[in-house]
Image: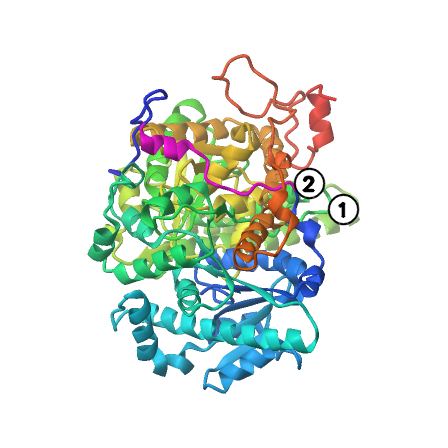
Amino acid sequence: MMRRQMSYRFEDQDASPIALRMNRRFSRVESGADLKDYFDRGDIASRENRWNFEVAWEVANKVGGIYTVIRSKAYVSTEEMGEQLCMMGPYKEHCARTEMEELEFPRGNPLLDAVNALRSRGYKIHTGRWLVDGNPQLILFDIGSAAWKLDQFKSELWEKCHIGVPHLDIETNDAIILGFMIAEFLEEFRNCAINYSQNNELSPPRIVAHFHEWQAGVGLIVLRTRLVEIATVFTTHATLLGRYLCAGNTDFYNNLDKFACDEEAGKRQIYHRYCLERGATHLSHVFTTVSEITGYEAEHLLKRKPDIITPNGLNVKKFSAIHEFQNLHAVAKEKINEFVRGHFYGHMDFDLDKTLYFFIAGRYEFGNKGADIFIESLARLNAMLKHEKPDTTVVAFLIFPTKTNNFNVDSLRGHAVIKQLRDTINSVQQAVGKRMFDTCLKGHIPGPDELLQKDDLVKIKRCMFAMQRDSMPPVTTHNVSDDWNDPVLASIRRCHLFNSVNDRVKMVFHPEFLTSTNPLFGIDYEEFVRGCHLGVFPSYYEPWGYTPAECTVMGIPSVTTNLSGFGCFMQEHISDPKSYGIYIVDRRYIGLENSVQQLSSFMMEFSRLNRRQRIIQRNRTERLSDLLDWRTLGIYYRQARVKALQAVYPDYLDDTSTFGSRSNLMFSRPHSEPPSPTSSRHTTPAPSVHGSDDEDSVDEETELKELGIK
């Protein structure tokens, strides 16, 4: 539990320059309109001869969180730009087979001319459409087809930028090959577009290329060093050096202004990667980050302040029935109940109707993702529940992929035993029903001995004896490799959370991602999230935070921190986040012990809510989905492109540069949350009047009527 933590080291009046810079808002273009105001399928862009290329290593290539960003934004991007948009990345056959429909561009299109020009140089290029919402155009480059030019590419990079790359760094070598291929394509495309425009009496082409992360940033560096007249945008979703620094026990945010960046990158053998990222940052016409906390980090580590903050969104789909998501929660929760019955067979000493499901999920970064303080807080929650609410049980799921030696035999056996019991009872039930029917036909009421025969009792008793177990339910569903050194299991052992009969907090460590083919859960991650009651993500290092954002869109309350981009965004746009089901743990200004206490109190506060209060809170949480929709947040990406275009083409005008403030993005306290004269009042949903616990009975109008609000 010894984890680096920011201490409250400055006062209001005597704030240090670092604190003042931290509290000051970053430069951010504010907007008064939504991106949907520009949904014309590229009609205006086509008339203006404006082209947009989006470049990322994770285009049609699922690796991490940037894949979610690019994929979810594809729909609104194509609605805005239409055929004037093209996404580019590496060709990875195992992903492209299922995610890409290969097609050629139509004849006469400058995209086809540029592709053919590169193919004539020996490059292998795949074109088509991405099989996601929006179906954007794709150009994927086969890195292997240009590997023979790697030494030439490295030589040019050294001569122009003095960046040397070790021969054995395969990932960086691949990034260099991809970057040069994309730069050559864009240079060729610009020449083809100029010829096409002159032949068809069009205005000169205006081209903007948007690069995500350092792997794609090599292409930006090449474009700028070759003086190609193309507007460039560079977005860092998390600084490379920041990730490495936070991976160790570093007091990161308190020492951002003190790190010797070159030295720290050299110690970690990533100096060449750091140079590529920093070069792309400074050479881009517009530099953006996904959150203000990442912007503060970039200002110190990359030595450039972001021009615009571009928050990450989601492609939100609204239900026609306003509370359909509540029904989905009930259905998904029942599937989780099935898993719990199997995992805890023989020790089902708790009522599933009074059981809450908490979860944490993501990349297995034990400290960065906050798993350390989550487990410690669960131990304290366990003690509080034993004392205050012994009939309430919390099942905490930890979904972190790591190396395993296959499924835990005890977990599989439990599900087999439960299935056998269910099948036996179903067969007995059918037999009893048949006997009852036959007896009633004869004109008299059957007695207990006539219905349940001795053979039936024997079958049921055999199943019940098979359910008996001497050991406690396992805390993990798999046999984890090197489990004695696994940080999650070590922390669980230290906190003595062993799923004993007396524990009110039960632990389930699932060391792989959830899929519908999983023999234990048989449920997709999205459905699993819908079935849980609370997502807990007390991250120390989280540039944005898609996991709490996904919870919010699905109407599931969540815990985040003021060191995550999502948490900062919610604090900025919601006057009382807790009343909307967004609990924000302070990991910036208070010590580690206080953060653990705050998290455990949040979870205890949530555990005190009755079912009706939780339904009301889920309704409020789901209302925030518009705030996270790409139709709302995509406008910032448009503004970044406009600013880059104006830097290269000064005559280009666009009305997004004159927008005022976004007052429509501010959520006030809910009407059903009564005001209080004291600031110490718990911001929990108001209790119900008649105490109904029906899962599907609450709607907004009824809620307001019960609370006496017109």
Magenta residues (range): 16-32
Location of residue 691 with respect to 48 vertically, above or below:
above
In front: label 1 or label 2: 2
Q: Which amino acid does label 1 sit on?
A: Cys
Quote the CA–CA distance across marks 1 and 2: 44 Å
What SS does tag 2 mark? loop
Inspect this view and state whether residue 649 appears: yes
Residue 542 appears left or right of 665? left
Question: Which is nearer the eye, 709 or 274?
Answer: 274
Image quarter where the C terminus lies is top right
Tell me where residue 578 appears, x and y as whole percent. 52, 29
Disc 1 secondary structure class: helix
Relative image position of residue 319 (x, y in whole percent) = 70, 47
- Which is more N-terminal, label 2 or label 1? 2
Q: Name the residue under label 2.
A: 323
**Residue tagged by mark 1?**
440
Rendering coords of residue 238 (x, y %): 39, 51
Does residue 416 appear in this view?
no
Horizontal placement of 391 versus 329: left or right?
A: left
Query: Which quarter of the figure has residue 21?
Result: top left
Say which residue appears at 64% left-offset and 36% top-offset: 664
Quadrant for the N terminus, please: top left
Indicate which disc residue 249 carries. Answer: none
Q: Do the residues labelled 1 and 2 touch (CB within 8 Å)?
A: no
Count residues near mark 1 (Cα–Cα under 10 Å), then give few for <14, some for 14-19, many for 20+: few
Q: Residue at x 48, y 67 (%)?
A: 61
Q: In this view, does 495 lie above or below 215?
A: above
